[in-house]
Amino acid sequence: MEIALRKFPSLALIPFALAAGPGVGAAQDTTNMRRICLAPAAVETSASSDAAVNAVREAFTAYLTGPTLQAQALQARLASQVRLEARQAGCPFLLLTTVKHEKKRGSGLLGRVAAGAAQQGAWEAGVASGSTAGRIAGHAAYGAAAGVAASNYAATFHAKDELTLSYRLESPDGKALAEGKDKRKAKADGEDMLTPLVEKAAEAVAEAVSR
């Protein structure tokens, strides 16, 4: 071993590099993490404000979670209180959102029933099979592409309904770092209009916090 170290001095550094490596990497990941506080969405003209709030929170949390992004949901509904809550939580970024659902015809009761039945059927089919593969398939179908809250919210939409999503990303001093508004019109009953709007907004937010 002593001869090997004389011929290759760099070998002596390997144990130290291995010991220091994970700690250095972990510290770097923590430094690069961007934490974003999500205020409960303000809801305008919707059949269910709670469903809208839950869907917006779920969608933004999903898109703003990753190796360098962390989303934290806040509880306060008043603008002044949610800003105070964000400061107390030590969040460097606060995301404020507003969702407006304009209904063009009757209630979404049948759509909600149909969506619920489809999810329940997928869940029960997987569990009833008794096999591990069946249970995994059931879980996968139950939590399909859109989250459960977004899927339930989409069940209230009808063809020609319009959904508008507005967002504003603020620094601790209230300065706007990014803001925008976008709208979609449903082409069919039960169409998920929220997820595409959130995805586009989340891209802008992620870019803003990484500057």
Image (cartoon, rainbow, N blue to C red):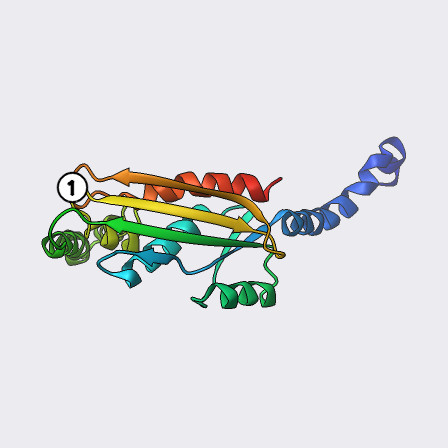
Residue displayed at 21% across by 40% down: 186
Residue 210: x, y in percent?
60, 41
Residue 121 x, y percent position in the rendering: 13, 54
* Vertical placement of residue 207 versus 171, above or below: above
Residue type at numbered disc 1 = Ala
- Outermost residue, right side: 6
Where residue 135 appears, as percent x and y from the top left, is 23, 54
* Left or right: 34 in relation to 1: left
Relative to 18, 119 lies left or right: left
Tell me the element at label 1. loop
From this viewpoint, is residue 73 visible? yes
User: Does residue 79 sit above or below 95 in this rendering?
Assistant: below
Quadrant where the C terminus is found in the figure:
top right
**Of the pair 109 and 77, the residue shown nearer to us:** 77
The N terminus sits in image quarter: top right
Residue under the point 32% across and 55% down: 55
Q: Which residue lies at the image location 84% right of the left edge and 32% below the top edge? A: 8
Q: Residue 181 occupies which quadrant of the picture?
A: top left
Q: 98 or 72: which is nearer to us?
A: 98
The answer to whether one can see residue 145 in this image is no
132 and 3: which one is in front?
Answer: 132
Position of residue 130 in the picture relative to residue 95 (left or right): left
Q: Residues within 10 Å of mark 1 (few under 14, many from 20)?
A: some
Which residue sits furthest top? 7
What number of labels is visible? 1
Q: Name the residue under label 1.
A: 159
Nearer to me, 104 or 36: 104
Q: Residue 45 is drawn in which quadrant?
A: bottom left
